[in-house]
Image (cartoon, rainbow, N blue to C red):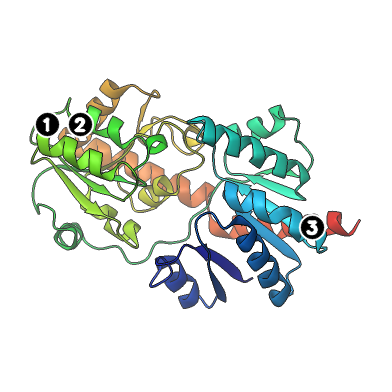
Amino acid sequence: MQVALVLTPGAEGGHPLVAVLQQAGVPVHVLTIGARQYLAEREAVAQCAAVMQAHIVHTHGYRADILHGGPAQAAGRAHVMTLHGFVSGNWRDRLYEWLQLRAAGGANAVVAVSAPIAERLHAAGLRRGVHLLRNAIAAPLAPLSRTEARASLGLPINGPLVGWVGRLSHEKGPDLFLDALEQTAPELQAAILGEGPMAESLRERVRSGPLSGRVHFCGGVPGANRYLTAFDALALSSRTEGTPMILLEAMISQVPIVSAMVGGVPDVLSASEAWCCPPGDLRAMAEGMQQVASRPEEAMERAERAAARVQREFSLGAWLDRHEQIYRDAFGSRAR
């Protein structure tokens, strides 16, 4: 396997994904392309696939799905897509999703990471080559201790703390997390790990509102899964999701979870393993965060059950085997 990573100018230096792949011995081809240089990107990726002598091109994300499937197939390569979720936000997002579904109709195989995504594909009339394959997770890197993690992130060493990790964008619902946090006791503090388009507005809201002094913005943190031990609970407040990797990472790290039951989350968690909240129910999320802090023994019991489940159902070995078979089938369908 080789990876072509398309980055915008200025983002290629020290990109964490490049370092992780190289440490794992995976050849990485970094392609520096301007944000809207679609034709240049299409040509560069096609040339890269030719240099690799690739048999299969596997794309992730609507831009890659739309741009690179057709050229791959025109060159005699199989095209595999992985759909991680649909944002369904403004008109531009909906246009991208429509184009992505059209690209999926021509792919040799489409991997849906949650049942709702597979159902969306079926509703669009796509059944051939659609595979429901939820995300998996390997054993984590050596996690930091609670004290080490908090010190490394510049967080208070003592006191209850709930964490939120992800891209600071509308679909991930960081604003909903703050809405819920406002309904909890003032001694419960929070840490937000991530960057994104909503970052500055969220910081301003905290600076000038009732959460002032309670929320710590840690920015983007490479290898964030090592720091989950800093939290008494991880909160997921997304408006939409596929199969969130951060949940699997928290489960395997035995960190209690308070989560909105959106997208593929109900396939990952049950009420015996986490505090499960109806989508958009901020009061339930606030109560869940408060209960984790006040009932640590129950929280740890749920976290232990969640860890057992992730090891039982989301192991990396079976996931890799399924992908290998998908690749074989996709390449076979291309040959026919």
Distance Cα–Cα, label 1 vs label 3:
53 Å
- Under tag 2, what secondary structure? helix
Residue 291 visible at all: no
Which x, y percent locates residue 303? 33, 43
Q: Residue at coordinates 40% horizontally, 45% vertically from top-left?
A: 247
- Is residue 54 depicted above or below 58 in this figure? below
Residue 200: name its quadrant: top left
Q: Is residue 50 above or below residue 209?
A: below
- Point out the tag, 1 or 3, that comes first from the N-terminus: 3
Which of the two labelled residues, at mark 3 and mark 2, occupies the earlier sequence position?
3
**Residue wearing tag 2:** 181
What kind of residue is marked 3? Gln
**Circle 3: element type:** helix
Alpha-carbon distance for marks 1 and 2?
12 Å
Query: What's the mark number on residue 209?
Result: 1
The residue positioned 68% from the left and 34% from the top of the image is 121
**Where residue 240 sits: x, y (%)?**
46, 33
- Which is nearer the N-term, disc 1 or disc 2? 2
Can you tell which of label 1 and label 2 is closer to the viewer? Answer: 1
- Taking the spot 25% from the left edge, 36% from the top edge, the residue there is 298
The residue type indicated by label 1 comes to Gly
Camera-nearest residue between 7 and 315: 7
Kindly identify which residue carries mark 3.
73
The amino acid pointed to by label 2 is Leu
- The reply, left or right, for residue 24 in relation to residue 197 is right
